[in-house]
Image (tube, rainbow, N blue to C red):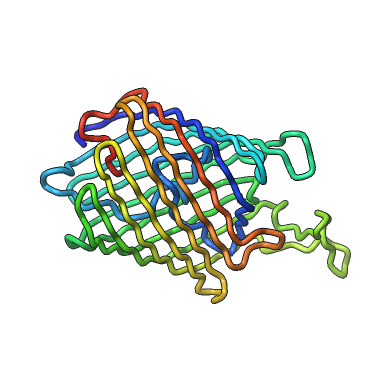
């Protein structure tokens, strides 16, 4: 890709959600998510594959400056009745073997609480990500990613993640990639005052011996080891497939781990219109009380390119 381009896309999603994805503050959220399609909620910490970019090659990958503006939405029925709208601004700058990228996202959503009929606001957050990738060898690269999140409904004034790592690229063709990563995840949580109050099954505050509400720690730190494997096949300018499997193991509590798996298939019909579908699986062996261990999400999207990419850019990786 040469120079700069602006991509504006409108995405409409039909989402099927199974179970509930618990977010115990002791665990990192993970750093992979389906790329071509959107579940209607942009997740910066989990909105992209957190993998080092493919090494620029002399004939296909040149210096690039990219700016993407994206909007989307979802409608969910069944276990999770909700709708949401989202907006994101993506930036990428690459010069030879060095690349920097950033994402800013805002989300808003409403849902129907279990046992109620009225809709209530349930999603309202702001997120950001900054990342650097650099190659030290044809098949070895280093990366560092910093993410931040403010989310009142998750009880977070701030969630800060730092994810350095090293990647080994087994297949390095521009349109056919296989890579593996080993990294470290540091997470810092600053919780809201409402989120640290311990409550019983009926939602009432639990009192201590003095009659005061019991509270969790205001701040929380977690350290984890991160393993990741990714595969990308740009079969043509019109069809692409990507999948990634991530394992997060806490080094503070040995029995606590998380597995994330994402797959995405995108088909370009014309330069103005494309179809995309994604499948996401999240498993946590030690979730919060009353939260299922397994959560799956399937999404389908219609993507309209108001400013179509130039010839040869279709299916390119970001």
User: Is residue 272 positioned above or below 52 on the image?
Assistant: above
| Near-viewer residue (159 or 298) | 298
The x, y position of residue 266, in whole percent, is 37, 40
Which residue sits at x=59%, y=35%? 75
| Near-viewer residue (285 or 105) | 285
The x, y position of residue 257, in whole percent, is 53, 68
- Count up the numbered dots: 0
Left or right: 284 as drawn, with respect to 137: right
The x, y position of residue 296, in whole percent, is 55, 52
The x, y position of residue 142, in whole percent, is 28, 60
Question: Which corner quadrant of the image does residue 116 belong to?
Answer: top right
Which residue sits at x=15%, y=43%? 60
- Quarter of the image with the N terminus is top left
Residue at far left of view: 58
Residue at far bottom of view: 254
Question: Which corner quadrant of the image does residue 114 belong to?
Answer: top right
- Quarter of the image with the C terminus is top left
Left or right: 87 as drawn, with respect to 123: left
User: Is residue 270 positioned above or below 192 on the image?
Assistant: above
Which residue sits at x=39%, y=41%? 36
Question: Which corner quadrant of the image does residue 117 belong to?
Answer: top right
| Near-viewer residue (299 or 216) | 299
User: Is residue 56 positioned above or below 116 on the image?
Assistant: below
């Amino acid at each position: 890709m040469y120079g700069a381009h602006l991509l504006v896309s409108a995405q409409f999603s039909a989402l099927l959600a199974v179970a509930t994805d618990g977010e115990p503050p002791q665990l990192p959220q993970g750093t992979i998510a389906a790329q071509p399609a959107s579940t209607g909620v942009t997740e910066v910490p989990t909105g992209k594959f957190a993998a080092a970019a493919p090494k620029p090659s002399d004939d296909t990958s040149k210096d690039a400056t990219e700016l993407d503006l994206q909007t989307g939405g979802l409608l969910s029925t069944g276990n999770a009745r909700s709708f949401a709208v989202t907006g994101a601004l993506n930036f990428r700058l690459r010069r030879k073997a060095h690349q920097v990228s950033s994402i800013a996202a805002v989300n808003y959503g409403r849902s129907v609480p279990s046992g109620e009929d009225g809709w209530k606001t349930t999603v309202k957050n702001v997120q950001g990500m900054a990342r650097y990738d650099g190659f030290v060898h044809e098949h070895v690269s280093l990366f560092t990613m910093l993410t931040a999140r403010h989310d009142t409904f998750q009880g977070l004034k701030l969630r800060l993640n730092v994810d350095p790592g090293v990647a080994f690229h087994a297949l390095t063709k521009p349109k056919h990639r296989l890579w593996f990563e080993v990294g470290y995840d540091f997470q810092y949580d600053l919780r809201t005052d409402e989120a640290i109050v311990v409550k019983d099954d009926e939602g009432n505050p639990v009192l201590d011996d003095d009659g005061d509400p019991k509270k969790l720690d205001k701040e929380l730190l977690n350290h984890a080891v991160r393993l990741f494997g990714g595969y990308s096949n740009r079969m043509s300018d019109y069809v692409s497939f990507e999948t990634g499997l991530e394992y997060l193991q806490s080094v503070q509590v040995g029995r606590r781990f998380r597995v994330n798996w994402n797959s995405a298939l995108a088909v370009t019909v014309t330069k103005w219109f494309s179809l995309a579908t994604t499948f996401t699986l999240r498993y946590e062996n030690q979730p919060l009380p009353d939260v299922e261990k397994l959560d799956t999400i399937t999404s389908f999207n219609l993507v309209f390119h108001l400013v179509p990419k130039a010839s040869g850019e279709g299916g390119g990786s970001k």
